[in-house]
């Protein structure tokens, strides 16, 4: 952000300088002599700058025109910057050499549509983010491993005490790829990377206290999902017999449906803009 502000200031200064130079050339166009071209060469430039400043302040109409131009440029650049942030990946890209071949995925999951599968996992990610935003513990229990859910639950309880809410919305998936998959018994662990843009800010008592509600962030995530390809009818956490609801009566763990439900076990931010 600091670099963006410096660029804006530099660009505006350059435009203003060129504009004033243009005004000065027009004002001196009736003269055949360049009054700033003395023998020493140095003092004339400084004097010319002061003359331009005096010209600006002695002409109220010219001063107002310059101010209006600067305001329009600032508004335009801010709108352009927000549009870029809200509609593009802002230069973030995935390193495709980390993507594993389709044959490695299909050897475990069968002949799947890779793009559709990645979109489904992205939709799971969005559902989790919405569940987090809306303090929806029931949804989060079905989308997260017990360990990750317990971490989320503690953080959500803290935010509720402070009357805070992490607002997230308008998700865009720019890129996604699968970077790893392993099978241990009936359990499959899959890692993937995505680049996504969305609004993300924190409110307290309804007021924004962190982040911006008019500018999207673009984040490069590594996500880990797990799924059970088979079941012996027992809870994988405590070994108790599972009821039809897939919620263990003994340890209250939510066990994903065999071969269909993927739950997130880890989320790591790799880069953000």
Image (tube, rainbow, N blue to C red):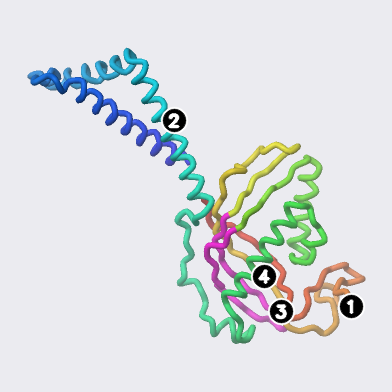
Assess whether residue 56 is covered by the magenta stretch: no
Give the magenta-colored segment's residue range.
172-197
Across the whole image, how many numbered discs are drawn on residues? 4
Contact? badges 3 and 4 (CB < 8 Å): no
Residue for badge 4: 225
Q: Main secondary structure of the magenta part?
A: strand
From where the camera sits, is residue 40 visible?
Answer: no
Residue for badge 3: 187
Q: What kind of element bears circle 2?
A: helix
Q: Is residue 170 left or right of residue 186?
A: left
Residue 215, percent from left and from top:
56, 45
Residue for badge 2: 71
From where the camera sits, is residue 103 visible?
Answer: yes
Name the residue at 79% across, 63% down: 141
Q: Nearer the viewer, mark 2 or mark 3?
A: 2
State the mark number for residue 244.
1
Disc 2 and disc 3: Cα gap in Å? Answer: 59 Å
Q: Nearer the viewer, mark 4 or mark 1?
A: 1
Residue 210, percent from left and from top:
64, 40
Res 269 quadrant in image:
bottom right
* Sequence-earlier tag: 1 or 2: 2
Name the residue at 47% across, 45% down: 81
Q: Is residue 249 left or right of residue 133?
A: right
Residue 217, percent from left and from top:
56, 50
Q: Is residue 173 left or right of residue 41?
A: right
Q: Nearer the viewer, residue 155 or 110?
A: 110
Mark 2 surroundings: few (<14), some (14-19) or many (≥20) residues within 10 A: few
Q: What kind of element bears circle 1?
A: loop
């Amino acid at each position: 952000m600091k670099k963006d502000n410096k660029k804006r200031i530099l660009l505006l200064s350059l435009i203003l300088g060129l504009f004033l130079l243009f005004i000065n050339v027009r004002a001196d166009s009736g003269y055949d002599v360049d009054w700033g071209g003395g023998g020493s060469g140095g003092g004339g430039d400084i004097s010319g700058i002061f003359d331009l400043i005096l010209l600006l302040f002695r002409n109220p109409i010219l001063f107002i025109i310059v101010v209006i131009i600067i305001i329009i440029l600032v508004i335009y650049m801010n709108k352009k910057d927000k549009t870029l942030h809200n509609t593009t990946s802002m230069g973030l890209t995935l390193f495709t050499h980390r993507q594993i071949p389709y044959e490695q995925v299909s050897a475990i999951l069968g002949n799947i549509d890779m793009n559709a599968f990645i979109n489904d996992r992205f939709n799971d990610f969005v559902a989790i983010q919405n569940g987090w935003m809306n303090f929806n513990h029931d949804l989060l229990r079905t989308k997260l491993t017990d360990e990750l859910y317990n971490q989320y639950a503690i953080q959500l309880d803290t935010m509720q005490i402070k009357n805070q809410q992490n607002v997230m919305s308008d998700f865009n998936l720019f890129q996604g790829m699968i970077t790893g998959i392993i099978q241990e018994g009936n359990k499959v662990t899959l890692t993937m990377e995505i680049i996504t843009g969305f609004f993300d800010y924190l409110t307290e008592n309804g007021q924004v206290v962190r982040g911006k509600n008019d500018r999207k962030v673009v984040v490069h995530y590594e996500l880990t999902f797990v799924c059970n390809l088979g079941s012996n009818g027992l809870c994988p956490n405590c070994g108790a017999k599972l009821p039809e609801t897939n919620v263990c009566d003994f340890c209250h763990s939510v066990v994903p449906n065999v071969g269909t439900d993927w739950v997130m076990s880890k989320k790591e931010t790799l880069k953000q803009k």
